[in-house]
Image (cartoon, helix red, strand yellow):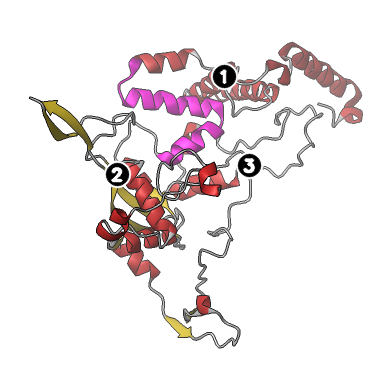
Amino acid sequence: KIIDSQRSNAPYRGAIGYKPTIDTKNEMFEQSVLPYSSPFELMKEIINEQLHADIIGCIIEDSSLFSGSVVLGGALVLRRKSVRKEVMIDGERVVMEDSDDDLGNNGIKSGEVLVVECDSDEAIGMALTCGLDLSLESDVWEKSQVACTVSENDDETKSIMDALLNVHVADESIILKTQGDGEASEGIPIQVPRSNNGAFRNFFASSENQPVFNTDNPVRSLQEYDELTVQDKAQLLLSLESFKGRLPRPRTLRETESSSAELSPLDEMLVPLIDESVRRQIFIREAENRGDKYGAEELKKEKSIRQLAKERAEKARVDGNDELAAAWDKEADFYASLRADVTQDEGDYSSFLDRDEWYERNRRAVAERNKKRFGSLFGDLE
């Protein structure tokens, strides 16, 4: 009755919510279709049948961007299979390979090779299932070699699952953590966010140097951004509350490091979270590097008033006019104080969240007059 209640045939063996696949005698004795011995066999069949790809390699690599730590991660190398089609030629059925059919996958045709990231234990399990060698970079192998000792589990209540030996690192200064215990892997301690103000401290305050809302804005110029190393950028991302993703692996950065016309995967994660004026300068430079003059001009036309003030301050500073540069810096800081979030482009959020420019200029003028008139009585008034 349970079998009959499911009417739809399963798209692949083991699919939940469909009619179970019942092996025929031909499948059991001639084709030797056996039940799955592990979840990896099911995944292998899904990759072959649903993704039309073969698993041609299994990799273990270092996934950490920080020096002094090795965090092993896995990856599978997939190669897209060609589509087999049957055509009738002179009344005869002919089977042919169509290498141009991408099956609606954006140009991923026969022979295309893709690297799919996974955990290290998943790469090992898939290598055992497919009978493939496990590839490991030589430098990762060298860094991962540690002296270990093993001991048996003497617990009388141990089960067959405890048959593996216990591994201990001989060097106590080395911390070894394993996957599979339900806890997330930990890298080096992340950097403390640069802003340590309370969440609501500046909400009602009228400060010249602080936005309405408490937002991190650690990169304030293009020069500061260019001075950041890969490790600095990774550490900065981890310190930002607005970052919710996962850091890219060193392999993906090496694939794009030779190109100056496009952002690296790490830059693509960090640039949307930094100061909008710095972000626009990065986009303009990127457009110019790839020869997109029209795109660069459009970006220049959309500069914010604050960015224009910052650029005029920099030009005055280069010309040696420090007084004019200080005046433009003050103007740029003023426009920054009006914004609820300087990391977002103008128009990306409601303008009602920003301070009114006319009101803020008048309020500051009145506060300045009161300071001059009453002296220390209004020393803390802004």
Q: Nearer the viewer, mark 3 or mark 1?
A: 3
Query: 158 and 151: which one is in front?
Result: 158
Residue visible at 69% across and 21% down?
338
Q: Label 3 to label 1, Cα distance in Å?
A: 29 Å
Q: On the picture, is 284 further left or further right than 130? A: right
- Mark 2, residue position: 53
Q: Position of residue 10 (x, y in %)?
A: 43, 43
Q: Nearer the viewer, residue 336 or 103?
A: 103
Q: Which residue is mark 1?
A: 309
Tag count in the figure? 3
Q: Which mark is residue 241?
A: 3
For the stretch drawn in magenta, the main secondary structure is helix
Which residue sits at x=25%, y=58%?
Answer: 30
Camera-nearest label, 2 or 1: 2
The earlier-in-sequence mark between 2 and 3 is 2
Q: In the displayed structure, does residue 99 sit left or right of residue 299?
A: left
Could you give the CA–CA distance between mark 2 and mark 1, rounded to whole angstroms? 54 Å
What amino acid is labelled 1 in the image?
Ala
Q: Which residue is located at x 29 percent, y 44 percent?
A: 53
- Quarter in which the C terminus is drawn: top right
In the structure shown, which secondary structural element does the residue marked by tag 2 occupy?
strand
Given the image, on which type of amino acid does mark 2 rest? Ala
193 w.r.t. 356: above or below: below
Q: Secondary structure at mark 3?
A: loop
| Residue 19 versus residue 125 in the image, above or below | above
Tell me the quarter of the picture where residue 136 sits.
Answer: bottom left
